[in-house]
Image (spheres, grey):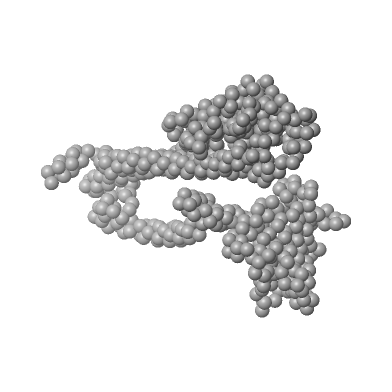
Amino acid sequence: MRKKHELFGFLRKLGIQKQLYTIYMLAVLIPVSLIGTFLVGNTYRLLTNYHGDLLESDNLRVRTILFEITTQVYNISEELSYHEKVESLLKKRYAYHEEFKAAVNRISEIVDNYADHYTEIDQVEIYCDNPDICDYKQYRLVDEETQNSDWYRRAISQTSVFWHEMRNIDKYGNEYWNLCLIRRIPLVNSKHHAVLVIRISNNYLKTRIGSQKYQICVSVDDGVVFFALDSENNGKPQPVALGSGKKQKIRHKTCLVEISELGLYLSDSHIYICTMDDQSYDTIRSIIQICILIILVAVFVPGILVYYFGQYFTRRVRTLRHVMYQASNEDYDFKEMVRGEDELSEAFSDLEVMVQNIKEKDAQMYKVLLKEQELTNEQQKMEFKMLASQINPHFLYNTLETIRMKAYTVGDREVATAIKLLGKSMRYVLENNGTAFTALKEELDYIEIYMKIQKLRFTDKFDYELRTQDGMDLYKCITLPLLLQPIVENAILHGLEETEQGGMVTIQIGQETGSEGIYIAVSDNGCGMDKETLERLRADIETKNPMKKESIGLYNINQRVKLCYGNEYGMTIDSLAGSGTTVTLHLPEKVYHDI
């Protein structure tokens, strides 16, 4: 109580305007600044941890895939290294090279089986210093350059497997690097040496571990980067050192970095995986700047209001004092008035006429304020409804992606795949809701996602195939969004209704014969329709029949095409009982042009 009296006693010693400034500092400026500083710091920490966790999860994904690939390649090398026919081929003496080539051809399926049927393998090479052999297919005679190379000397000097990056040049003269498994092939009772080299395909790695969000650099032991999504990093050292912090400055840009080490199966080689995110800090910085801006608005807007209100209130008090001074001197010709409905305006009640005028004007002002408030309330309700109806597709997609990553982390790949497909499907539908046109390639990608979801549901009931006429650029071919899904759904649910397994849905895209228009044909190998049913369906897609729910989707698609392009375009249906059904969309020439 004593402190309370001391505080009010201190305030009473100040003028009204200074009292308002003091209350503003104690009630707004200091608390908002302290709380805002804490929230900004906490938000920065949470966002950094969140993006760091996503980066770590992606690094774990890459590490898992690389371990799986290298282990499989190791198992293949085990079979090749100890294959009796390969060993016999390398030890044998040959009178001429044709004899060696004939021997290679007799057992060529041994090596070709792995090189041709395993997509992760780019090339299989067997080096041998037997002078009777020659360079043929996967077999190489060791030349002086190979004999002096570090990897060859290391391979013949140890029995264990090791991994090494190797530089290569494609047929166009472009330089690229491969991760290679290298091991000695034991040649029993022979003075010759043989070394097996299995090159892992970079295209396969790009397909398996590629990321649209993160930069990835992979190296082995102390070597240079053999795989990177940014080709500028290939053949260079890792951009960051193992054990460095998560926040790094790379190429004058702040990045989140996750680098990990992977010990390879039954080998003393180690792979180092560096995953970099050069976009998160820009996002975090933008969010923090917005938070700081909000805090500044929360501090300065009340400060400005307090400043102007203080001046306004002080003027009214001074006006009241001046009018009361005039009244005390019997001067009732007031040139100044105090308006409002507070205690200051009530002081004018001693002057009857003036008080009455003030009340009438206040009543009029009150009605205006009520109407303004009603309009403001209605506007706020409308804004609230608009905000409540908005859906952020990125929030939905990111939420599904988070759930998918959690499912992937616990090993439930089927659930993760289903969530991923659903997220992509939702993103396409939400992004194209209200849009007029979309690229045909994007529409077909969405249909393929839809097919995959249906296959998760129906398992082996059907398969699907997409065919595109040679020379067509689907990115430059535009169409109405969400046009094909009802047709494909009809083919699966109705066309293949009686099919238990072996069903096939085929989507074929090509140019119309004799014109520059295009067609999109969706076919199934289901039960088909008799002639009478087919004629009824053709009539239903041309004329709306509210009594029939089955064909309403095809009717809507047909009408969309006709309304957009004209009556000469639209949908045709062909079917034979027992031979399946084909639904074809005919679109005009103008849909095939540069976007």
How far across and down, in percent of the image, does residue 272 sit? 50, 33
Q: Residue at x 54, y 28 (%)?
A: 158
For this view, does 583 lie left or right of residue 453? right
**To which quarter of the image does residue 50 belong?**
top left
User: Can residue 10 be spotted in the picture?
Assistant: yes
In the rendered image, which quarter is residue 453 located in? bottom right
Residue drawn at the location 60% of the way across and 54% of the way down: 428
Task: Check the image and report above or below for 415 versus 291.
Answer: below
Say which residue appears at 43% left-offset and 31% top-offset.
Answer: 243
The residue lying toward the viewer, choosing from 261 and 552, is 261
Tag count:
0
Q: Residue furthest right?
A: 514
Q: Residue furthest left?
A: 2
**Placement of 41 over or under 324, stated as above or below:** above
Pinpoint residue 40: horizontal percent, then vertical percent: 38, 40
From the viewer's perspective, is 503 left or right of 214?
right
* Spot occupied by residue 63 in the image (x, y as percentages of width and height): 51, 40
Q: Nearer the viewer, residue 356 or 269?
A: 269
Report the residue at 67% width, 72% height from top.
Answer: 498
User: Is residue 167 or residue 465 the one in the foreground?
Assistant: 167
530 to 82, vertically: above or below: below
Can you name the residue that lies furthest to the front here? 189
The picture places residue 120, in percent across and down from the top left corner, at: 62, 42
Q: Residue 539: in sight, yes or no?
A: no
Q: In front: 423, or 27?
A: 423
**Which image quadrant is residue 561 in?**
bottom right
Left or right of 461? Residue 157 is left
